[in-house]
C-alpha cells in the first residue's frame, strides 16, 4: 500500500539519496548517492527494501516525520536519540510507525551522516537512472534541493510490516585510512610522502557532500600544484597550493586541476566521511590488488550483516 511521508522538521543537508548515479561521469555528472553506502544499505534492508532504494540522508541532526499509513522505519549511520509517539526506540533496528504518529530523530553521536529508510522506499521520479540529489547542480532528488519542513515525499508499496534488527554487530575499526597512490603521486617527493603517511591528519568543519578539507602538515608538490584538469573519482585526494589535502566525496566534481596524491579506497571512504570534525587519523598506502581483495572482503562482510538480520519478537 502506498503512503506519503510528511517532513515537519528537517536537519542540515537533508536530501534524498539512493545507491548513486552511474555511467555519466564522462559527461560531467557526479555519482552522488549515500555518503555512507553501508549504513544506507543496512537501513534499507531493515525495512525490507532493496539495498539501493531511495532513503533520507541527513547531516548531524535528524528531524520530525509522520506518514499517512503504517510503515516501517529504520535509522542508521550512528547512534542518536529516536522516539516514536514519545516512546524511545533504538537505532540500527526497524520499527512500526503507525499512521499519524510522529517519528523524531535527534543529533548523531560519533558520526556525521545518518539515514532514515522507510518501507517501500521514496518514489520520486528518477533522473538519469537515480533518485539521488546532487545539490550543487540541482539534479535529482526533490527538485534538486535539500528537504525542508513542510515537504511531502511519496513512498512505494509495502508488504507485511515485520520489524527486524541486526543479528551480527556492524562495527568499524580505527585502522589508518587506506589509499592507493596516484594518479599524480610522482608530483610529490619522498619527504612529502613520509609526511603524508607518517603524520596524523584531522577532519575539519570544512566539509559537505562534495568534499572534505583536512588539517595537518602541508604537502608540497615538487612539480607544482596546478595541472591540466583531468578526471577525478570519488575518493580522490587533491592537494592545492595551500598544501591542505581535499578529499572528494559523493558529490565531488568529475574533473580537477590540482595534483592528486592518492585515492581513498572505496571501503574506507565512508569511515573517513563519518569521522566527526576534529578527529585525528592516519593514512596507509596499499596496492590496487590488495585494495581489490579488501573491497571484496568488505562487501562480503556487509552481505553477512544484511543476511544475518533477525525478526524482532513481539
Image (tube, grey):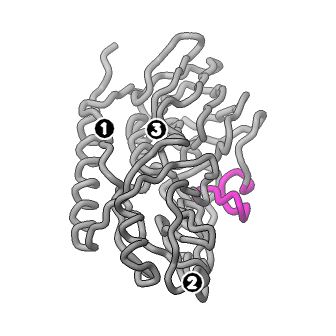
* Tag 2 and tag 3, C-beta contact below 8 Å: no
- How far across and down, in percent of the image, does residue 93 sit? 40, 27
Residues packed near mark 3 inside 10 Å, few (<14), some (14 to 19) or many (20 plus): many
For this rendering, which residue is in front, 4 or 227?
227
- How far across and down, in percent of the image, does residue 236 sit? 48, 69
Quadrant (top left/top right/bottom left/bottom right) for the N terminus: top right
Q: Which residue is located at x 61 percent, y 32 percent?
A: 62
Residue 136 falls within the magenta-colored stretch: yes
The answer to whether any part of residue 22 appears in the image is no
Does 160 sit left or right of 73 as displayed?
left
Tell me which label, 1 or 3, sits earlier in the chain: 3
The answer to whether any part of residue 26 appears in the image is yes
Residue that badge 1 annotates: 171
Residue range in magenta is 130-144
Residue occupying the far top of the picture: 87
Quadrant (top left/top right/bottom left/bottom right) for the C terminus: top left
- How far across and down, in percent of the image, does residue 98 sit? 56, 20
The disc at residue 77 is 3
Amino acid at each position: 500500500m502506498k503512503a506519503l511521508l510528511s517532513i515537519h522538521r528537517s536537519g542540515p543537508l537533508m536530501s534524498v539519496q539512493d545507491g548513486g548515479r552511474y555511467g555519466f561521469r564522462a559527461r560531467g555528472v557526479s555519482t552522488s548517492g549515500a555518503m555512507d553506502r553501508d549504513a544506507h544499505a543496512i537501513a534499507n534492508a531493515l525495512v525490507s527494501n532493496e539495498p539501493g532504494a531511495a532513503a533520507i540522508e541527513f547531516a548531524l541532526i535528524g528531524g520530525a516525520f509522520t506518514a499517512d499509513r503504517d510503515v516501517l522505519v529504520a535509522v542508521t549511520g550512528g547512534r542518536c536519540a529516536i522516539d516514536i509517539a514519545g516512546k524511545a526506540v533504538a537505532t540500527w533496528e526497524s520499527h512500526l510507525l503507525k499512521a499519524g504518529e510522529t517519528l523524531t530523530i535527534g543529533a548523531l553521536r560519533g558520526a556525521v551522516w545518518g539515514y532514515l529508510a522507510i518501507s517501500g522506499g521514496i518514489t520520486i521520479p528518477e533522473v538519469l537512472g537515480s533518485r539521488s540529489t546532487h545539490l550543487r547542480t540541482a539534479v535529482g532528488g526533490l527538485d534538486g534541493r535539500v528537504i525542508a519542513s513542510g515537504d511531502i515525499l511519496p513512498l512505494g508499496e509495502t508488504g507485511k510490516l515485520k520489524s527486524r534488527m541486526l543479528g551480527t554487530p556492524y562495527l568499524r575499526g580505527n585502522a589508518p585510512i587506506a589509499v592507493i597512490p596516484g594518479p599524480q603521486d610522482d608530483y610529490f617527493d619522498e619527504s612529502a610522502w613520509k609526511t603524508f603517511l607518517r603524520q596524523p591528519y584531522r577532519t575539519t568543519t570544512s566539509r559537505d557532500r562534495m568534499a572534505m578539507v583536512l588539517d595537518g602538515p602541508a604537502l608540497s608538490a615538487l612539480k607544482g600544484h596546478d595541472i591540466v584538469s583531468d578526471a577525478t573519482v570519488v575518493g580522490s585526494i587533491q592537494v592545492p597550493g595551500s598544501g591542505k589535502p581535499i578529499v572528494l566525496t559523493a558529490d565531488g566534481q568529475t574533473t580537477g586541476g590540482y595534483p592528486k596524491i592518492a585515492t581513498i579506497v572505496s571501503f574506507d571512504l565512508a569511515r573517513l566521511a563519518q569521522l566527526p570534525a576534529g578527529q585525528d587519523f592516519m593514512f596507509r598506502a596499499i596496492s590496487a590488488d590488495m585494495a581489490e581483495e579488501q573491497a571484496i572482503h568488505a562487501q562480503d562482510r556487509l552481505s553477512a550483516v544484511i543476511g544475518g538480520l533477525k525478526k524482532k519478537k513481539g
